[in-house]
């Protein structure tokens, strides 16, 4: 008999899930449309059925020992999924719903926290006890590990580094405030930076032929790889803002590394080297040449399941 | 027989020390000039002798079970006192020196970290597991408690919130960089603010008759209490900068409270209410009305010994 946990990552469009052992071997994984206009129980029953079919079909005897869930705006302490903007369920006690359905130990946290645990169990942070996972997607998420444990804070909502104010009176953020880090360092942020550069410079650029609505981080990356000045400058500015933020974060946490994960981080060296340079330039002397900036080593596409699975393995051991 | 720890706080001018039980009852305390132009062993031998005289004289049978030391630029992991600017010993392994002399368990950390532990054991944070202790002296120090434990980070130097950059290109800091929080929020910072205000306003003020060298935070406080506009405005600005910094710190740590300790915090309500207001105004919505800003409840003058004693009680239990 093998013991496995079920990791579920609930996204706005799709929900991915899978079974993994403690070493992070993914024995099975699948995905379903999230369909949040329908009750969450419908989604969870489909997952339960899908998993049961696999368990019945496989030759191995499987014991599922717990369920870990990564979902936006979700609170580890209360178990609540608190009205995430891209899901239509309002506020629900997801931990309880899952407990009622599976009768197994469960844990829930946001996707950046789950990614941080996944990184520590199965990725680039295997030997680290103090690091910060940075997820660069539409926004910027963070999961903070101190002394081998996730920092949840007093209310379960610690680690919102995307909403650290980096520029007073700066860019308008989706949170209603101004100058948050994620308005500069995220897929949304780099698009805004490109449009500022298009407005304020006279350089030729293929990006001048793309509308705001159609411009993606991927298109900016492709232009940068071809040497486009505007695109390269946008990456440089994004990296500068991230590096300055990492310098400040170090004064709180003195981590071994900042680990970049998610869409924008696929720009790889284009981002990492410049972030590191900007961070070093700004660090207090005692921290210089001590803090790494590296890319996630979680496998693309499976990272979310590994993170959610790690969350519950972390509870059980 | 009663078990006590020895708490020692090494300052630039004086060293205070005392014996306390686990409940924080100070059984004995004393102080000596630090005299750092002489070898540290001379100071430690005097402390040893002083304590031995007390132990011999008292009717109680005392077992000293460990030694905790708070000292500037000192590292919990390495035990090193690393070349603090106001002490002349250079870099020494203080933990080893103390171990060699007393043959007892010992621990060392900086004064802000010791104050945080003291606050958690004996002060305003007795029931808190997530808070930040802020020491407002010549500079600004911080001790961060996450899940009931001090955050040391990867290298033992976490918690330097005084050196978070709050204004790019801002005031010159003693660390060689610009715009650090402590250049605005500290005894030094508020003096600088007063001189900026004297330069940029035309208000009458008794502070116009005090030289830069002679102006102290105490004099600014006394003027503020008498209703002086410049002094009040300087406190308001200091509080605004602190509140903004606490708002950002909350996005990392989501603490239950920020606890103000040290010289400048004796301004009390003059500071606390305005810091709280500025913090709330800047907080991300999910954190609003959750985070306290309060004053330390450690007794003036004995806080440093209690903190150093708590550090070693924390190790032993």
Image (cartoon, coloured by chain):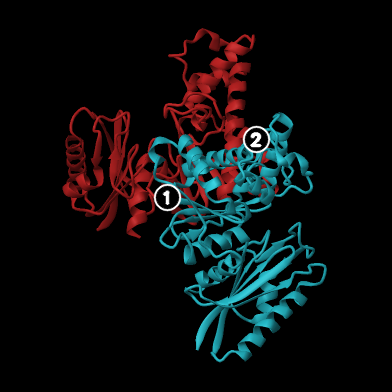
Chain colours: A red, B cyan
Left or right of residue B198: residue A25: left
Q: Residues within 10 Å of mark 1 (few under 14, many from 20)?
A: many
Residue at mark 1 to residue at mark 2: CA–CA distance:
28 Å
Are the residues tagged 1 and 2 within 8 Å (C-beta)? no
Of all chains, the one bearing label 2 is A
Residue B62 image offset from top left, x and y in percent = 55, 87
**Mark number displayed over residue A214:** none
Q: Which residue is under mark 1?
A: A153
Of B152 and B54, nearer the camera is B54
> What element does badge 2 sit on?
helix
Of all chains, the one bearing label 1 is A
Question: What is the quadrant of the N terminus of chain A in the image?
Answer: bottom left
**Mark number displayed over residue A278:** 2
Number of numbered tags placed on the structure image: 2
Question: What is the quadrant of the C terminus of chain A in the image?
Answer: bottom left
Residue that appears at 70% across and 84% down: B49
Of B313 and A99, nearer the camera is B313
Residue B114 image offset from top left, x and y in percent = 57, 63
On screen, residue A76 above or below B50: above
Residue that appears at 52% across and 58% down: B296
On screen, residue A241 above or below B164: above
On screen, residue A73 above or below B109: above
Task: Report which quarter residue A272 is drawn in.
Answer: top right
């Amino acid at each position: 008999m093998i013991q496995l946990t079920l990791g579920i990552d609930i996204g706005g469009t799709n929900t991915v899930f899978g079974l993994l052992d403690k070493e992070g071997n993914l024995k099975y994984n699948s995905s379903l449309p999230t369909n949040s206009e329908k009750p969450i129980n419908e989604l969870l029953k489909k997952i339960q059925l899908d998993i049961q079919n696999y368990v019945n079909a496989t030759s191995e005897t499987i014991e599922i020992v717990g369920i870990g869930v990564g979902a936006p705006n979700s609170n580890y302490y209360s178990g609540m999924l608190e009205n995430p903007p891209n899901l239509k369920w309002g506020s629900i006690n997801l931990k309880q719903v899952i407990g009622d359905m599976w009768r197994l130990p469960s844990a829930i946290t946001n996707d950046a926290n789950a990614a941080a645990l996944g990184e520590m169990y199965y990725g680039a942070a295997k030997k680290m006890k103090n690091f910060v996972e940075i997820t660069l997607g539409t926004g910027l998420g963070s999961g903070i590990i101190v002394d081998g444990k996730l920092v949840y804070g007093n209310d379960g909502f610690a680690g919102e580094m995307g909403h650290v104010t980096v520029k007073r009176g700066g860019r308008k953020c989706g949170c209603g405030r101004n100058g948050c880090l994620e308005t500069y360092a995220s897929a949304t942020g780099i698009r805004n930076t490109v449009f500022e550069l298009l407005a304020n410079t006279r350089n030729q650029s293929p990006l001048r032929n793309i509308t705001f609505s159609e411009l993606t981080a991927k298109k900016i990356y492709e232009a940068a790889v071809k040497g486009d000045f505007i695109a390269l400058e946008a990456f440089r500015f994004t990296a500068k803002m991230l590096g300055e933020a990492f310098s400040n974060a170090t004064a709180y946490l003195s981590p071994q590394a900042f680990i970049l994960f998610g869409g924008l981080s696929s720009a790889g060296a284009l981002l990492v080297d410049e972030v590191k340079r900007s961070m070093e330039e700004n660090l207090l002397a005692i921290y210089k040449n001590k803090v790494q900036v590296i890319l996630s080593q979680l496998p693309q596409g499976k990272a979310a399941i590994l993170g959610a699975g790690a969350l519950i393995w972390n509870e059980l051991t």
